[in-house]
Image (cartoon, rainbow, N blue to C red):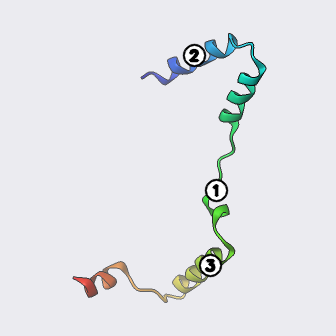
Amino acid sequence: MDIQLEKLELIKILTEIDNPKIIKSIKKILTKEKKDWWDDLTDAQKEDIAQSELEFEKGEFTSFEDVMKKYR
């Protein structure tokens, strides 16, 4: 699929639409703001992540390899 050709076809279709409701709907789809996953976290989850980052910076962590040694 040639993306540039697809875009041109969409432009052609858009120029032929006379219904304002359809134009408004298309515009809403195309300009829909992307939501950041961070905004969906609870305050407790954000605090846990911040605490984990502090622990990591202090070297208070266990490597993946060490954890896996326990279960192999």
Q: SS class of the residue under badge 3?
A: helix
The quadrant of the picture occupied by the C terminus is: bottom left
Q: How crowded is mark 2: few (under 14 residues within 10 Å), some or many (20 or more)?
A: few
Which residue does the numbered mark 3 point to in the structure image?
Answer: 50
Q: Which amino acid type corresponds to the residue marked 1 in the rendered image?
A: Asp
Q: In this view, does 28 lie to the left or right of 71?
A: right
- Report the Cα–Cα distance between label 3 and label 2: 46 Å
Q: Which residue is drawn at 27% across and 87% down?
A: 70
Nearer to me, 10 or 20: 20
Q: SS class of the residue under badge 1?
A: loop
Q: Residues within 10 Å of mark 3 (few under 14, many from 20)?
A: few
Q: SS class of the residue under badge 2?
A: helix
- Report the Cα–Cα distance between label 1 and label 2: 30 Å
Which residue does the numbered mark 1 point to in the structure image?
Answer: 36
Residue 8 is tagged as: 2
Hey, which residue is sitting farthest right in the picture?
20
Residue 71 lies, with reference to residue 22, above or below; the image says below
Q: Do the residues labelled 3 and 2 touch (CB within 8 Å)?
A: no
From the viewer's perspective, is the residue at label 3 or at label 1 nearer? 1
> In the picture, residue 2 is in which quadrant?
top left
Give coordinates of residue 45: x percent, y percent.
Answer: 61, 75
Q: Is residue 71 left or right of residue 22?
A: left
Q: Which amino acid type corresponds to the residue marked 3 in the rendered image?
A: Ala
Give coordinates of residue 40: x percent, y percent.
Answer: 64, 62
Mark nearer the N terminus (3 vs 1): 1
- Report the Cα–Cα distance between label 3 and label 1: 17 Å
Residue 30 lies, with reference to residue 55, above or below; the image says above
